[in-house]
Image: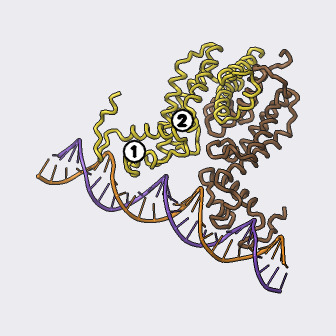
Chain colours: A brown, B yellow, C purple, D orange
Amino acid sequence: MPKQTIEKSSYHHGDLRQALLTSAETILRREGLQSLTLRAVAREAGVSHGAPAHHFPDLANLLSELAAVGFHRLAAELDKTDDATIQDRMATGRAYVKFAIENKELFQLMFQSAKLDSSNTTLRNARSKAIARLAKSGAVPLEAPSLAQLGDITANWAVVHGFAQLLLDGRLATIFKLAPEGTTAMNLLDAVLTSVARARKSR
Amino acid sequence: MPKQTIEKSSYHHGDLRQALLTSAETILRREGLQSLTLRAVAREAGVSHGAPAHHFPDLANLLSELAAVGFHRLAAELDKTDDATIQDRMATGRAYVKFAIENKELFQLMFQSAKLDSSNTTLRNARSKAIARLAKSGAVPLEAPSLAQLGDITANWAVVHGFAQLLLDGRLATIFKLAPEGTTAMNLLDAVLTSVARARKSR
DNA sequence: GATTCTATCTTGTCAATGTCTAGATAGAAT
DNA sequence: ATTCTATCTAGACATTGACAAGATAGAATC
């Protein structure tokens, strides 16, 4: 990607906004959310501590834009699954957790509501798009869905999201100790998804 | 509670450690996790900013001790449910989510791994105790459990935890918009738990 | 080409924070 | 009474977020 060839003068970086987002993700992955500060991002991008203010009014805005990037990527991963059948619905769940594992810090930022700007439209749109793909899992959009059907949709998301969060936080360590040797996170996830899967034809 | 009668001199508070934890929870509930700083806690407790250092080596330690308090309370709530039957397993799930709703900020702190001290034994013990009560839900402790059985246990926790997190973050707002008028969080939770329970019966 | 405009940056400032240190205080121990 | 030490106060330092003043450089205008 010939991005590196952008001429950078001191007072006109060229594409500082994108460079700041890239630097933010670099720091997030390398050092964690605690180290993700405006000044650290500015240093990583090689500009002064005041430079980000022109592109991101405050830290919450920068974090929200980065979280939106994460949701776009998640949506793209979920798009790769076809959720017409239960088998493929498990694929969607797997894709969700796989994304969370491979992008642990970014995933945790994405759901860090206290640090994000809930009015940020970029974030809201990206999140809605990703959630829409997950909600499609197991059911086509329904007109006037019953509470039971909404329960199914919510259960699908809740179990996969809960699994991802508990896994990333290390809360499932004792489960893995009890599991057969060599059990991977995806093995356990499949067992979880099988546990909650059921025939839908009867409903 | 005759705690208020403790004589407080400037240099020997009496029970500053407990007072700091109480102040921390007050600030957490009133202003959120972002405002929970060592200096804010010291101000709330009416002492200098250096005073907490004698009781809590750093902020992470204070937050971990407060999170441990939360896990103890959660364990106590879960203890009130009897999980011998599927009906009571739903009660455990309800108790978990009810606790999360009634203690939103504390619950979010409890699972804020990035801010907590993972080596803190008070926290680890309290958390293990609470998790053990949840894990009992749906199955008695098994010797050499199968992956399917571990899947059931994990699914129980994941779905309830995921539901609580998504609810607290406001992510279920669109589900509630589609739901019958007057649907409460506990209504939707029951639908979720029923969806999962139905899956068990069909296997 | 000169001038003006303005987007985009640098530099500085202030208040707040976490952490650490020196020293004051007051209760316990001798 | 003296000493010890747990427990506090007060101060210092580095870093942060946010804001402001002003410098810079490319765009727009004449």
Residue A188 seen from this side? no
> Mark 2 or mark 1, which is nearer the start of the sequence?
1
Please tell me whether residue A56 is drawn above or below residue B203 in the rendered image.
below
Question: Can you give x and y, in whole percent of width and height, for residue D14 in the image?
Answer: 51, 64
Location of the C terminus of chain B (image quadrant): top right
Res. A131 in view: yes
Kindly indicate the quadrant of the structure image that contains residue A167: top right
Q: Which residue is mark 1?
A: B55
Q: Which residue is the site of mark 2? A: B106
Q: Of the residues tagged 1 and 2, which is closer to the observer?
A: 2
Q: Is residue A69 above or below residue B172?
A: below
Q: Is residue A146 left or right of residue B49?
A: right
Instruction: Say whether residue A51 is left or right of residue B199.
Output: left
Using the image, name the chain to which the residue with label 1 belongs.
B
Callout 2 amino acid: Leu
Residue in the picture at 61% in, 18% down: B91
From the viewer's perspective, is B131 left or right of A74? left
Task: Say which of B152 and A165 sits in front.
Answer: A165
Residue at 78% from the left image edge and 15% from the top image edge: B202
